[in-house]
Image (cartoon, rainbow, N blue to C red):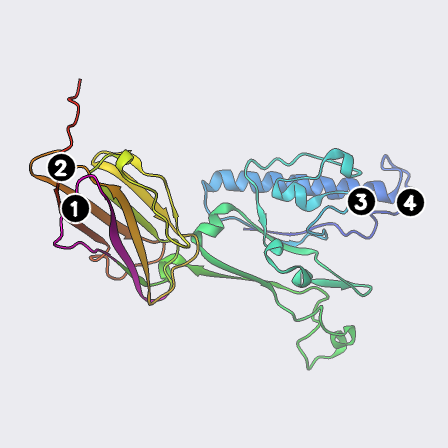
Amino acid sequence: MLLTHNLSLLAVRDLQLRTDAWLTQGNRSRGKRLAQAVRLAELSEALQVEAHGQPYFLIGDFNAFEFSDGYVDVMGVLTGDPAPADQVLVHAESPLSAPLHNLTLTLPEPARYSYVFQGSAQNLDHMLVNDAVFEVGELEFTPVRLNSDFAADNADTAVVPMRTSDHDPLSLRVAVDRFIDADLSVTVRGGRQPLISGREAGLPVVVENAGPQAARRPVVMLELDVAPSQVGVVQVPDWQCDAPSAAPKGTLIRCARESAMPASTREKFEVPVMVQRTAVQDFLTLSVMVTAASNDPEFDDNQASFTWRVTGRLVAIPPKR
């Protein structure tokens, strides 16, 4: 984590002359703001490389908007996406090899402020994070409305907590995945009826979350002992399922859900398979496993399988060459 307080915007347009190489106060302000942004980005890059993918935070009063102000794109340099050179007065490329994310941009537009200047609500305070922070758990970011929403005369009153500063503090709540309990289970609903060769069958699977909390980033792995060409695409609302791919036992399908799976809910999967009987005594097996980023207090019921007998017309399979 790195905390910062960057140079003010006040002199960014100042034409007052100087006796040094800067020539004007505005030139110095813009040049220093750019140099500060580049140096902070270099520090961010070095700290992340040293930390080998650990969560990283860059937090502070950047005295910069979440968008380019046309003078210097401070936040663009610090997040790895600077404005083009022809859109700012002074420009630099960002030294970041991987972008940082400004959590200000996760707020609704009317809530994107932490400071009021001459009646204009604006955002100068930001929290930047890397990709690894999102892997830790669910984030809830918000400015704490203690100062900017209250009149300035509260600053002179010792009996109220408001206006201890002219900026709002920032709050980030992280619901850590491994502290969230969600009891997932999976069932393959087979039956006594055999599968008929030459027909398509929908193999039923049920994934359940018994709670007590929502399951974070659940993943369902489906494995069948048939060729990928026999297996169709699995479609389940709120889940993204990969196309069937070859695996050591036949076919593998991975289904993932970005949104959390609520507690006390069930999800029904149907795996479409074109059944082919290739032996006198033939069988088809579906094996399923469900996992999640959250903690599962009862892992014994996270795997299931079922084997169907295959009957009907025998399909001739060309011999291997």
Q: Position of residue 207 (x, y in %)?
A: 29, 57
Q: Which mark is in front, 3 or 2?
A: 2
Q: Residues within 10 Å of mark 1 (few under 14, many from 20)?
A: many
* Residue depicted at 71% across the width and 52% down the height: 65
Residue that numbered label 1 is attached to: 195
Q: Is residue 85 above or below residue 235?
A: above
Q: Which mark is in front, 3 or 1?
A: 1
Judged from the image, the secondary structure of the residue bearing numbered disc 1 is: strand
* Residue depicted at 77% across the width and 34% down the height: 86
Q: Could you tell me how far apart the alpha carbons at marks 1 and 4 are, in whole angstroms? A: 83 Å
Residue that numbered label 2 is attached to: 313
Q: Residues within 10 Å of mark 4 (few under 14, many from 20)?
A: few
Q: Which mark is in front, 2 or 1?
A: 2
Q: Could you tell me how far apart the alpha carbons at marks 3 and 1 are, in whole angstroms? A: 76 Å
Q: Could you tell me how far apart the alpha carbons at marks 2 and 1 are, in whole angstroms? A: 11 Å
Q: Quadrant of residue 46?
A: top right
Query: In this rendering, would 54 be left or right of 62?
Result: left
Report if the CB atoms under discs 2 and 4 are less than 8 Å apart.
Answer: no
Query: In this rendering, would 67 be left or right of 175?
Result: right
Q: Quadrant of residue 261?
A: bottom left
Main secondary structure along the magenta-highlighted residues: strand
> Residue 290 shows which numbered tag?
none
Q: Is residue 155 above or below residue 106?
A: below
Query: In this rendering, would 10 be left or right of 263?
Result: right
200 falls in the magenta region: yes
Name which of mark 3 and mark 1 comes first in the sequence: 3
77 falls in the magenta region: no
Residue type of the residue flagged with mark 3:
Ser
**Of residues 67 and 40, the one drawn nearer to the viewer in this rendering:** 67
Q: Could you tell me how far apart the alpha carbons at marks 3 and 2 are, in whole angstroms? A: 82 Å
Residue type of the residue flagged with mark 2:
Arg
**What stretch of residues is rendered in magenta?**
186-213
